[in-house]
Amino acid sequence: MSKLSGLSCVGIFWAVLSLLATVAASVGFYMPYWLHGAFSDSTPIYFGVFRRCNYPKLDDGGHLVIVRECGRYTTFWDIPSVFWQIATVSVGVGCGLGLLVSMTGVMSVCVRDVITPVVGKVASAMQLCAGLLIGGGLAIYPYGWDNVEVHQACQGLSGHYNLGSCTLSWAFYLTGCGAGLTIICCMMACHAHRKKDTHAVTYHV
């Protein structure tokens, strides 16, 4: 198959792994299952960076009620922690870069000469940046565990890098796996292009 595309065998593996890494990071980023806590009535609550499930809200009568659904915060500035706002931008940009590179890789499987040595180096640099941005967002996220919403969901025990009674959920780990795979992919991108065959041609007169 590698002879029919512009990628080497390493390049085909890189393209597939890049796509898997991007899907993992993007799904984990979108899903609100990063942090799992519970209210006093044992109602489970989940937080992502910009989405949440089963969140408290004041009704028209001024009473606190639990909205049993998942949704994003109304505006970017409604995200309850500046650290979560930074993480949203960081992980979002990282996923965008990863998606751009992975789509280029998938296209190069079927189209020759998309990935040249120079393009491979650029793709490697972009994936390194993507992995670091996603990983950086994951590292920043725990600084927001001191906000009021998380504090209530974690029995008042949460703080910077302190989960209290809460636990990390699967989407956080999925995003982390996507970041790690993206960084691994950046080391293969430079070797993704297929070297052209250079056979000497002899002309007989």
Image (spheres, helix red, strand yellow):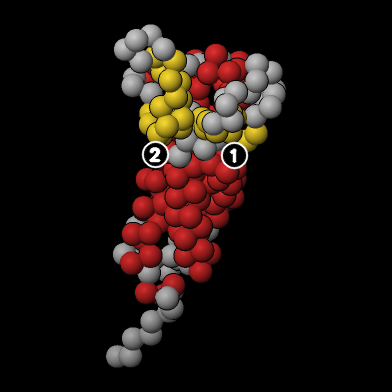
Between disc 2 and disc 1, the foreground one is: 1
- Decide: marks 2, 1 in contact (CB < 8 A)? no
Give SS at disc 1: loop
Task: Please determine whether, in this image, residue 168 is positioned above or below residue 6.
Answer: above
Identity of the residue drawn at 37% across and 74% down: 4
Residue 186: x and y in percent read 54, 48
Total numbered circles? 2
| Left or right of 158 on screen, residue 182 | left
Residue 191 vs 125, above or below: the answer is below
Q: Which mark is residue 169?
A: 1
In the rendered image, which quarter is residue 200 located in? bottom left
Residue shown at 41% from the left, 51% from the top: 102
What residue did someone put label 2 on?
96
Q: Is residue 117 visible?
A: no
- Nearest to the observer: residue 128 or residue 22: 22
- Percent x, y for residue 84? 50, 22
Assign the N terminus to one quadrant of the image.
bottom left
